Image (cartoon, rainbow, N blue to C red):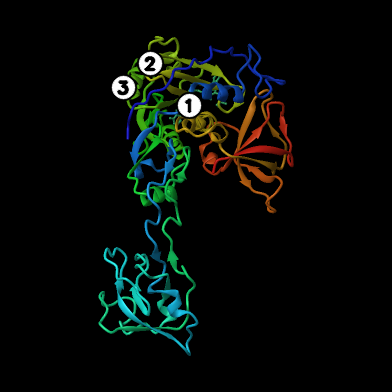
C-alpha cells in the first residue's frame, strides 16, 4: 500500500568539512569540528531526523510484520465457551467414578454434540452425550471421556449418526477427573485482559490471536514505502545487452531487496542518466509515493556526480540534503537530508556496489526500522565478537572504520567469541565476494593492521 505520512520536520546538521582522516582520526562518537563524521555520529544524525510513521488501521494480513500501536484487550473470553478437547462422551463425574475394564459404568446416550452445535442435550444422572473435539460441553456434563476409554458406545463411535439412536448406551472403562478434557471458557485469554501490548511486532501467531479475538483490522505503523533509484549513464538494466563502457545496474536491485528485507515496501525506479534536471524531476515525481528515498551513485567528486549537483543548495521549501565524508571504508561519501512537503528522509549513497550496500545496512536499515516504530536498541543489525581467521595481517586505512566482508561462525561452545574469515579483498566493487559473505568485520579507526587471531566486532547480516 502506498500512502503518505505526516512527520515532524527536524533539522539536519550543517555540512561538515571534508578533510581526509589519517591515523589518529576521530574516535567513535567524537567528531573533530573540521574532520569527517564518524560512523556513529552520522547514524545518530540520521536517526535524530527520523520520526515513526503515523499509525493506520490495516486488515490483518496487511499488518504482518508491522508494530501494533495500541494495546489489544480481550473483548470476549477465549475460548468463548467450555468445550471438549477430545472426541468421546460428555459425562457427570459421579456416574463414572471407579469405572474400570472389569466394572464399566454403563450410561445412556442422550444425544450428540458436534463443533458448532447450537442446541445442546442436557446430561442428567446416568446419562452421557457423544461429543466431538471443539464442541460445547452440554449442560450437566462435568468432564469428557475420550472414546478410547469406552467401548465406543452402541451409538456407533464418535463420528456417525448425529442424533444417536434411541436406547444407545456407552460403557466407560476409565473415569476422567472433574474438568478433564474440557477446555474452560477464558482459559486461553480472559475477558478484559491485555492480549497484545502496543509495540508488539505482528507475526503469524499474533495475527492468529487477533483473528481468534475477532479483530479484522488493527492500528499499526505501516511498512515504510521506499523508492530506490540508481544514477549513472553507464547503467543498463539486467537482461539488456551491454554496449561499450556499460555495466548492468545492480545497486537498485540490491538496495530494493535490502529495503524489503528491512520490512519496507520497495519500489525500484529505472536508472537515471547523469543529468541533474532529470534526476530532480524523477525524485519530485517519486516523492508523492515515498516515505524514504535512496539513490546510489553520483556523490563523489567526479565531473558527473549528478546526485550531489542536483541536491546541493536545494530550495529550502523543497528540503535540504547535506553531503559529507565519513571516516569509513567503504562508504566514505554520503548524502542525507529531508525532502518534499512531508520531509521524507533521502539517502544519497555512494555508487560502488559494496559501498552502497554497507551504507544501507549501517544507516538506511536503522532509519527504516525507526520509521516503522522499532525502539532505539533494536534498529541496527545484531552484532557479535569474533576472532579473525586470516593467513596474514590485513591492512586497514587508519582513521577510518573499515567494514570487511566475512563469513562468521558462532562459538562451538555457545559462549565466547566466534570466528570470522574475510571473503575477498577490501575493494568496494567486489560484488561476487559480497554475495558470499554473511557478516561485516568491523576494523576500528585506530587499527592499521588487523592481526590474525585478533578479536573484532562483526555485524551479522543474517
Ligand atoms: N577523486 C576521487 N575519486 C573518488 C573518490 C574520492 O574521494 N576522490 N571517492 C571514491 C569512493 S570512496 C567512492 S565510494 C566512489 C563514489 O562515487 P559515486 O557515488 O560518485 O559513484 P559513481 O561514480 O556514480 O559510481 C562509482 C562506481 O560504482 C559503479 N556503479 C554506480 N552505480 C551503480 C549501479 N547502480 N550498479 C552497479 N554499479 C554501479 C559505477 O559504474 C562506478 O564504477 O567514488 C570514488 N572516487
Ligand atoms: O568509500 Mo568508497 O565507498 O571507499 O568505496
When asked about the image quadrant of residue 85, the answer is bottom left
Marks 3, 1: nearer the viewer: 3
| Image location (x, y in percent) of residue 36 | 61, 17
The C terminus - image quarter: top right
**Of residues 348 and 99, which is closer to you in this image?**
99
What secondary structure is found at the residue carrying circle 1? loop
Coordinates of residue 246 in the picture (x, y in percent): 40, 29
Q: Is residue 51 above or below residue 254?
A: above
Q: Which residue is mark 2?
A: 276
- Residue 396 is marked as none
Q: Ligand 2 is located in which of the four quadrants?
A: top right
Looking at the image, which is closer to me, 193 or 5?
193
At a point 50% along the width and 25% down the height, the residue shown is: 350
The residue closer to the viewer here, 462 or 146, is 146
428 on left or right of 27: left
The reply to whether residue 33 is visible in this rendering is yes
- Label for residue 351? 1
Q: Residue shown at 38%/16% (left/top)?
A: 276
Amino acid at each position: 500500500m502506498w500512502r503518505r505520512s505526516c512527520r515532524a520536520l527536524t533539522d539536519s546538521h550543517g555540512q561538515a568539512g571534508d578533510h581526509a582522516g589519517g591515523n589518529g582520526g576521530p574516535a567513535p562518537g567524537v567528531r573533530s569540528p573540521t574532520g569527517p563524521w564518524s560512523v556513529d555520529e552520522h547514524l545518530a544524525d540520521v536517526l535524530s531526523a527520523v520520526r515513526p510513521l503515523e499509525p493506520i488501521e490495516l486488515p490483518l494480513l496487511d499488518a504482518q510484520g508491522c508494530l501494533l500501536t495500541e494495546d489489544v484487550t480481550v473483548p470476549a473470553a477465549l475460548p468463548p465457551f467450555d468445550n471438549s478437547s477430545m472426541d468421546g462422551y460428555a459425562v457427570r463425574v459421579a456416574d463414572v467414578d471407579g469405572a474400570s475394564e472389569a466394572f464399566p459404568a454403563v450410561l445412556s446416550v442422550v444425544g450428540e454434540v458436534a463443533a458448532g452445535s447450537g442446541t445442546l442435550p442436557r446430561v442428567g444422572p446416568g446419562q452421557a452425550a457423544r461429543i466431538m473435539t471443539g464442541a460445547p460441553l452440554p449442560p450437566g456434563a462435568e468432564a469428557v471421556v475420550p472414546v478410547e476409554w469406552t467401548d465406543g458406545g452402541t451409538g456407533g463411535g464418535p463420528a456417525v449418526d448425529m442424533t444417536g439412536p434411541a436406547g444407545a448406551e456407552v460403557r466407560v472403562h476409565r473415569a476422567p477427573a472433574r474438568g478433564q478434557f474440557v477446555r474452560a471458557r477464558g482459559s486461553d485469554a480472559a475477558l478484559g485482559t491485555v492480549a497484545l501490548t502496543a509495540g508488539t511486532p505482528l507475526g503469524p501467531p499474533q495475527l492468529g490471536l487477533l483473528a481468534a479475538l475477532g479483530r479484522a483490522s488493527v492500528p499499526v505503523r505501516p511498512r515504510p514505502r521506499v523508492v530506490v533509484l540508481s544514477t549513472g549513464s553507464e547503467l543498463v538494466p539486467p537482461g539488456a545487452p551491454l554496449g561499450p563502457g556499460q555495466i548492468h545496474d545492480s545497486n537498485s536491485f540490491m538496495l530494493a531487496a535490502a529495503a524489503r528485507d528491512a520490512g519496507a515496501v520497495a519500489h525500484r525506479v529505472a536508472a537515471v542518466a547523469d543529468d541533474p534536471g532529470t534526476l530532480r524531476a524523477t525524485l519530485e515525481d517519486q516523492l508523492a509515493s515515498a516515505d524514504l528515498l535512496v539513490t546510489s551513485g553520483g556523490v563523489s567528486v567526479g565531473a558527473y556526480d549528478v546526485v550531489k549537483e542536483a541536491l546541493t543548495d536545494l530550495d529550502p521549501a523543497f528540503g535540504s540534503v547535506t553531503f559529507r565524508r565519513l571516516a569509513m571504508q567503504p562508504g566514505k561519501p554520503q548524502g542525507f537530508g529531508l525532502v518534499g512537503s512531508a520531509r521524507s528522509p533521502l539517502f544519497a549513497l555512494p555508487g560502488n556496489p559494496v559501498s552502497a550496500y554497507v551504507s544501507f545496512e549501517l544507516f538506511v536499515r536503522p532509519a527504516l526500522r525507526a520509521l516503522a516504530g522499532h525502539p532505539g536498541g533494536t534498529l541496527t543489525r545484531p552484532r557479535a565478537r569474533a576472532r579473525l581467521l586470516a593467513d596474514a595481517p590485513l591492512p586497514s586505512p587508519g582513521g577510518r572504520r573499515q567494514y570487511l566482508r566475512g563469513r562468521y561462525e558462532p562459538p562451538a561452545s555457545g559462549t565466547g567469541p566466534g570466528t570470522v574469515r574475510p571473503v575477498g579483498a577490501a575493494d568496494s566493487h567486489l560484488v561476487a565476494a559480497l554475495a558470499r559473505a554473511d557478516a561485516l568485520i568491523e576494523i576500528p579507526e585506530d587499527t592499521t593492521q588487523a592481526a590474525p587471531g585478533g578479536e573484532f566486532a562483526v555485524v551479522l547480516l543474517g
